[in-house]
């Protein structure tokens, strides 16, 4: 089992999860985070840290479509290990539906 970040993270990008990850398996895109499933040790400490519930175990049926996206972009984006402020529009965007199709950016973030 591993954990994945879903589209709920897009345009929110809370980073509470990266601060608690013991293996630093989070990677930062311009407007979301992803988890490298090959580095994740399945400890689960990140999941309850996400204030918008954007992280799911891959055993959740809703996580299926996110596993490859997380794998692909974790190989392209820089590693992030420190907590930063969420995106300015995070609060208003947290319940938006269809964020992958509307807002996903494949551009990398800043990383550490």
Image: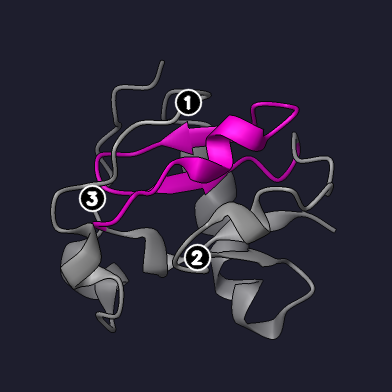
Tell me how far mark 1 sits from mark 2, CA to CA. Answer: 17 Å
Q: Is residue 53 left or right of residue 38?
A: left
The quarter of the displayed image where residue 103 is located: bottom left
The residue that mark 2 highlights is: 54
Q: Position of residue 16 (x, y in %)?
A: 50, 43
Indicate left or right for 46 with 59 as reference.
left
Q: Position of residue 107 (x, y in %)?
A: 24, 38
The residue labelled by disc 1 is 80
| Quarter location, residue 33 | top left
The residue where tag 3 is placed is: 105
Which numbered mark, 2 or 3, is in the foreground of this view?
A: 2
Is residue 40 at all visible to an observer of this figure? yes
SS at mark 2?
loop
Can residue 13 be found in the magenta stretch? yes
Q: Residues within 10 Å of mark 2 (few under 14, many from 20)?
A: many
Q: Residue at 55% across / 35% down in the picture?
A: 18
Magenta span of residues? 11-38
């Amino acid at each position: 089992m591993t954990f994945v970040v879903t589209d709920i993270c897009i345009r929110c990008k809370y980073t509470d999860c990266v601060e608690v990850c013991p293996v630093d398996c989070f990677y930062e895109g311009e407007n979301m985070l992803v988890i490298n499933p090959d580095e994740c040790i399945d400890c689960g400490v990140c999941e309850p840290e996400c204030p918008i519930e954007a992280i799911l175990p891959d055993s959740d049926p809703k996580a299926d479509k996110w596993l490859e996206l997380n794998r692909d972009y974790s190989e392209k984006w820089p590693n992030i290990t420190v907590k930063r402020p969420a995106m300015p529009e995070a609060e208003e965007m947290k319940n938006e539906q269809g964020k992958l199709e509307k807002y996903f950016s494949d551009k990398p973030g800043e990383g550490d």
